[in-house]
Image (tube, helix red, strand yellow):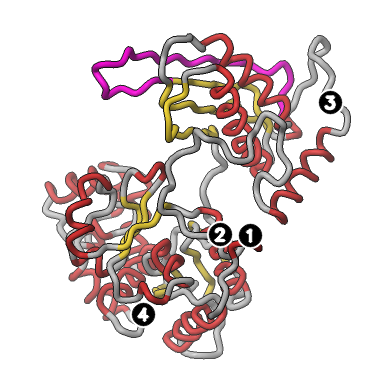
């Protein structure tokens, strides 16, 4: 029987901000999402004040001022760097690992020579020692049970480690866990299950798998089996390759001229192209869109989308930016104050599926080697180190990040200095 350990960073973005600001420990802290719009991470102290996940920042200003809540804009460069260090440490602590998200990974705990709780505490201590981030560890014979164990470790233990290898402990936790806490049971599924008097994880585990499959889906059936201790989701199960890649942002200031929109669209297309190459695919169709704000009744509203097919599938940034700008030219209209733009790549093909076209332009010579070198340099030296001339280094229209912390680990000029 396999054994899984789920390791999760506590309040990840907040913990990453506190790593370089120890004065924030014990202080309510929140991190805002793109454009400083909504809360995406909260410290326990902020949760105790009633600040909810996804709450708009503007609605919290009085509460923030009243309780001295510290507020940060998202610093994704910092979070990505610390996540990579976290994953590197985990990779040395297990024979197999599967990354689940920026702050969470599954480890194989098969064949250990030490008790599982001891192993969990060792993982927690090593991450704290080598990266400085607090984590919780849930251990169980299935992924679904390990997820519940991790939640229990986070909310109800001081050690931060819960081992559910004992069936008696599994039953006890399942009876205490609402069905909505089960991994994969979203809001709509929860409502349907509760209508069937399935209120807890234990109630769900006692359902007939065949009936659940017929009434819901094979995925929910597997969830039932996993709650019973039968492993249905292997360690290597990860997200499917994306069928579309989108990159869009709201501007910090309205853009009224075509040149500003060209810069934004070129920037977003370049980022989408990086993601496309990382996935190993090529794109056959691109969409570009622009729109004004929708909430100001005193401004005229406008929004358009253009679809641009590529003559030959490509993941070359130059090809994709050229196509995106051609689409932009066709939908831009003067006289509007644009609030957002975006690019969507779609209709992906893998290298072995590309069919040549006798009448299409020949691929750019050296394209593969150039894009590989571009990605390697930017991965090592920081995103945007090498970029197209159309992509500005510090655009004035970039989204709001007025409370962003320094680039502690990626810029020499912003390294923390001991005093």
Q: Quadrant of residue 261?
A: top right
Q: Secondary structure at mark 3?
A: loop
Indicate which disc, 4 or 2, sits on the residue closer to the N terminus.
4
Q: Is residue 78 above or below residue 246?
A: below
Q: State the residue in front, 176 or 321.
A: 321
Query: In screen coordinates, is 95 left or right of 17?
Result: right
Q: State the residue in front, 256 or 75.
A: 256
What label does residue 125 carry, if any?
none
Identity of the residue drawn at 80% across and 45% down = 373
**Marks 3/4: CA–CA distance:** 54 Å
What's the magenta region?
A: 291-315
Q: Is residue 335 above or below residue 255?
A: above
Identity of the residue drawn at 48% across and 84% down = 125
**Disc 3: which residue:** 364
Q: State the residue in front, 330 or 211.
A: 330
**Disc 1: which residue:** 411
**Disc 2: which residue:** 407
Identity of the residue drawn at 77% across and 39% down = 371
Query: In screen coordinates, is 381 left or right of 403?
Result: right
Q: Is residue 329 above or below residue 402?
A: above
Indicate which disc, 3 or 4, sits on the residue closer to the N terminus.
4
């Amino acid at each position: 029987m396999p054994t899984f350990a789920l390791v999760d960073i506590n309040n990840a973005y907040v913990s990453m901000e506190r790593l370089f600001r120890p004065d924030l420990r014990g202080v309510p802290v929140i991190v805002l999402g793109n454009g400083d719009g909504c809360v995406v991470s909260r410290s326990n102290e902020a949760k105790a004040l009633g600040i909810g996940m996804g709450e708009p920042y503007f609605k919290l200003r009085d509460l923030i001022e009243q309780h001295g809540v510290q507020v940060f804009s998202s610093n994704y460069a910092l979070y990505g760097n610390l996540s990579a260090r976290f994953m590197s440490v985990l990779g040395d602590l297990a024979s197999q690992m599967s990354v689940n998200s920026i702050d969470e990974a599954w480890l194989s705990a098969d064949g250990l020579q030490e008790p599982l709780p001891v192993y969990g505490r060792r993982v927690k201590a090593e991450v704290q020692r080598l990266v400085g981030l607090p984590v919780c560890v849930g251990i169980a014979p299935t992924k679904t049970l390990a997820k519940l164990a991790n939640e229990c470790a986070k909310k109800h233990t001081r050690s931060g480690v819960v081992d559910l290898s004992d069936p008696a402990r599994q039953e006890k936790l399942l009876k205490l866990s609402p069905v909505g806490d089960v991994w994969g049971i979203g809001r709509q599924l929860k409502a349907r299950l509760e209508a069937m008097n399935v209120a807890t994880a234990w109630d769900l585990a006692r359902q007939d798998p065949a009936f659940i499959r017929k009434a819901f889906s094979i995925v929910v059936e597997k969830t039932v089996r996993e709650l019973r201790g039968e492993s249905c989701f292997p360690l290597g199960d990860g997200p499917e390759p994306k069928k579309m890649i989108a990159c869009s942002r709201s501007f910090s200031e309205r853009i009224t001229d075509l040149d500003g929109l060209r810069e934004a669209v070129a920037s977003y297309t370049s980022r989408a192209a990086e993601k496309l190459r990382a996935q190993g695919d090529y794109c056959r169709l691109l969409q570009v869109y622009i729109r004004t704000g929708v909430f100001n009744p005193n401004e005229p509203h406008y929004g358009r989308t253009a679809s641009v097919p590529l003559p030959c599938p490509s993941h070359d940034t130059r090809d994709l930016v050229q196509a995106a700008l051609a689409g932009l030219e066709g939908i831009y209209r003067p006289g509007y104050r644009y609030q957002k733009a975006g690019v969507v790549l779609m209709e992906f093909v893998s290298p072995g599926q590309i069919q040549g076209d006798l009448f299409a332009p020949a691929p750019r010579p050296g394209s593969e080697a150039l894009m590989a070198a571009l990605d390697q340099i930017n991965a090592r030296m920081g995103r945007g180190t090498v970029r197209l001339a159309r992509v500005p280094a510090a655009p004035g229209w970039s989204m709001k990040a007025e409370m962003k912390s320094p680039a502690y680990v990626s810029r020499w000029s912003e390294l923390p200095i001991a005093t």
